[in-house]
Image: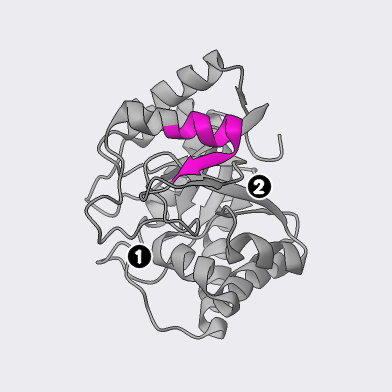
Amino acid sequence: MKVDLNCDLGEAFGNYSFGGDNQIIPLITSANIACGFHAGDQHVMNQTVELAKANGVGIGAHPGLPDLQGFGRRNMDLSPKEIYDIVIYQLGALSGFCNVHQVKINHVKPHGALYQMGARDKAIAHAIAQAVYDFDKSLIYVGLSNTLLVTEAQAVGLTTAAEVFADRRYEDDGQLVSRKESDALITDTEEAIEQVVKMVKSQKVVTKNNKEIDIQADTICVHGDGEHALEFVTKIRDRLSKEGVSISKLGG
């Protein structure tokens, strides 16, 4: 049994530091690198690609909505064509730095509101997936388990990885509990670890309403901006190892 461990990184901007990328990257197998729209900038992208390469970590593009102030977590009324274009634009930006460092983008994972919108809206999900396919059909597409993000990506011909979250609670339909709700985030390390083990080994998760639902776990996300991100990643690795689960990057 194996699983990928990913983290959203490269989210600093200008003079604003963010997260503990230097400490987290050696502990994960895939890095989702912000592409400048919701977070990050050209200098941070360059540094994060270099850091990921040095640690043998799979490099992923993390395209989001053009909303730096809202960190890409606010819905925007964009057409599927506009969404297609912003995804292509951001993939191109990250690809430039990958070319300089002689590495390839390994996967793509939408960010924040773009991710959530795609999980619920077929046209948006298709636009994101089509952009990824048209840019490079060999890329692995990461999407929320059991949602339109995965099924639409598969429909256009992409290889997919179903994602689960260590630090988020779930609705009964498999969607993530909105961050607007007070119980959306799991801040207790032991609770997060138990949720991860159950998702990976039993392919089940307990929702906020205490209902057990099926879930596919190809890759586990820990948010790099979370207060306990480093602790979560460290302890999740240790626990999965004890459970006989190997951690390897997507496609590895």
Question: Which residue appears at 59% of the width and 33% of the height?
Answer: 202
Q: Nearer the viewer, mark 1 or mark 2?
A: 1
Q: Please state the extent of the stretch shown in magenta in the rendering.
A: 195-206
Q: Nearer the viewer, residue 63 or 206?
A: 206
Residue type beneath disc 2 = Lys
Residue 117 point in image, percent of width and height: 46, 70
The circle drawn on residue 50 is none
Question: Can residue 57 be seen in this snapshot?
Answer: no
Horizontal arrangement in the rendering, residue 143 relative to residue 117 (left or right): right
Residue 50 point in image, percent of width and height: 50, 39
| Disc 1/disc 2 C-alpha distance (Å) | 25 Å
Residue type beneath disc 1 = Gly
Q: Quadrant of the C terminus?
A: top right
Quick one: SS at disc 2?
Answer: loop
Q: Nearer the viewer, residue 245 or 70?
A: 245
Question: Which residue appears at 46% of the width and 59% of the height?
Answer: 175
| 153, above or below 184, in the image | below
The circle drawn on residue 104 is 2
List the residue tagged with mark 1: 72
Quick one: SS at disc 1?
Answer: loop
Q: Residues within 10 Å of mark 2 (few under 14, many from 20)?
A: some
Residue 40 point in image, percent of width and height: 37, 55
Q: Earlier in the sequence, mark 1 or mark 2?
A: 1
Q: Quadrant of residue 227?
A: top left
Q: Nearer the viewer, residue 170 or 114?
A: 170
Q: Is residue 4 magenta?
A: no
Q: Is residue 202 magenta?
A: yes
Question: Can residue 51 be seen in this snapshot?
Answer: yes
Colouring method of the image: one colour
